[in-house]
Image: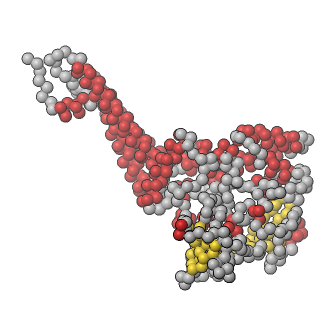
Amino acid sequence: MPTVNSESPKRRFFARLVRNWVSLVGAILVVSSWFAFFLLLTLDFFAPNKNPYLGILTYLVAPLFFLVGLILMGIGGLLQRRQNARAVAGAPPTRFSIDVSRPRDRRLLLGFAVGGAVFLLLTSVGSYQTYHVTESVQFCGQACHTPMKPQFVAYQNSPHARVDCTRCHIGPGAKRFVQAKYNGIHQLFATLSDDFKRPIHKTERIHINQQTCEQCHWPKRFIGNLDRTYTHFLADETNTAFSVRLLLKVGGADPTHGPVGGIHWHMNVANKIEYIATDEQRQVIPWVRLTDTNGGSTEYRTASFKEDPAAHTIRTMDCLDCHNRPAHHFRAPNDAVDLTLAAGRIDAAIPLVKSNVVAALTGGYSTEADALQKIASFLSAKYPDQPKAAALIDEVQRLYQANFFPEMKADWRAYPNNLGHKEWPGCFRCHDGLHKTADGKTKIQASDCNSCHVILAQGNGEQLEKLNPKGYSFFHIDAINEDFSCNNCHTGAFPKE
């Protein structure tokens, strides 16, 4: 008489999933992935610094292992079903059993238990260590090597080089937390599929604003005046040095810590400034509204802007509208070469070295390797008998690698710097004298060269010792200063013709 299988269909189904080693391995993966998921989730929620890339492990990698475990369990179940189907008719179904009285089974059971425990331990330790790896600067900058290389290199040379990426790139609140997780996974797939823009730009997914800056910087701080000297070199045969010593009127915006005024009057401690930008990089600002401490508001607009402001996104001015490259600044070739000459890393006695180095840096190159080879060839041809040519080539190549990334089309031209007004409009986006009230009687004043800074001295040699506390009028040593907007001529490389 055939043996009757008294197991219920549901019980037989689950029994098939654990009656062979393939299914048990899958079960261990399922349990371990759930363990890793909840461990990473706990770390993510309770960590002091939120990490966007941890979402890749928590919501992508751990579920992937969970899915692999389920697939293995299913394969084991199918194997068990086929084995039962091939059994002799009337024979009881093959059962996976362990008899602890048999030495072989005891060894297998012990090995399986120890292996499972070690696997869970490694899962927990690995998950924890991986969490720390994903919050590191190296992971943020180097895991996605090609797209993030320009930002990573620029960051290493920035004033914020010792601030972890996640301190700025994660906004406060649950919404920002979820968006950060989504953004991390989105970046992973974009990198794997090579689907990203060149150059990359900050998107609305990355929320960095005044609250981000105020985690470390106090907006009510009174800075006052700062003494700064900027040394430039002309593109002539002798690389003539020309320095400008400025007293920058940074000031402050809180009356309890100093007189209100200066550049940091814009800090919105007492006043509120709103604006409309008509381009993605916020270089064109045709409309501005100022709300004072009494609640009164004044609107300014350019003559060409006749649209309803309500039809546009109205932004409130914050730190990043001026300090928009605090950690990822790409130096313009003129500035990079001036700094290197002033520091003595390039010998200013080499004839025409300023113009030749700028020309070498701004050549059209397809890759970094192509650029380094052509820079060496160009400068070797310019200085065939110069004993310092090798050192010059090394330094220029270093400058290129720090500021130019042809594979990502990233250099100073792709990223406007609003701190100042030499190569980009900067301050003059609003302070151009063209923003007026509706009646035309009031306008945002266009600054002269001593409104936000006082020129204490300019020139070279003994000229820099003749300080004028009232300020000199600025003059160009090699051109007539007729145009108010500096960036109309200054390009960061050679001036516009």
Residue placed most toward the observer, 281 or 2: 281
Provide residue 223's location: percent of width, then percent of height.
65, 74
Please tell me in which quadrant of the rendered image residue 436 appears.
Answer: bottom right
Task: Determine the residue located farthest toward the bottom in the rendered image.
Answer: 294
> Residue 337 at what x, y percent from top left?
79, 54
Query: Residue 27 versus residue 14: which sits nearer the camera?
Result: 14
Q: Position of residue 227 (x, y in %)?
A: 74, 71
Horizontally, residue 487 falls left or right of residue 196, namely right
Report the front residue among 312 and 453.
Answer: 312
Residue 325 is at least partly visible in this image: yes
Quadrant showing the C terminus: bottom right
The image shows residue 58, relative to residue 94, as above or below, that is below
Q: Quadrant of residue 69?
A: top left
Task: Give the residue furthest to the top.
Answer: 88
* Residue 300 % position (x, y): 63, 75
The residue shown at (71%, 61%) is: 424
User: Dividing the image into 4 quarters, which one contains the N terminus?
Assistant: top left
Residue positioned most to the left? 1
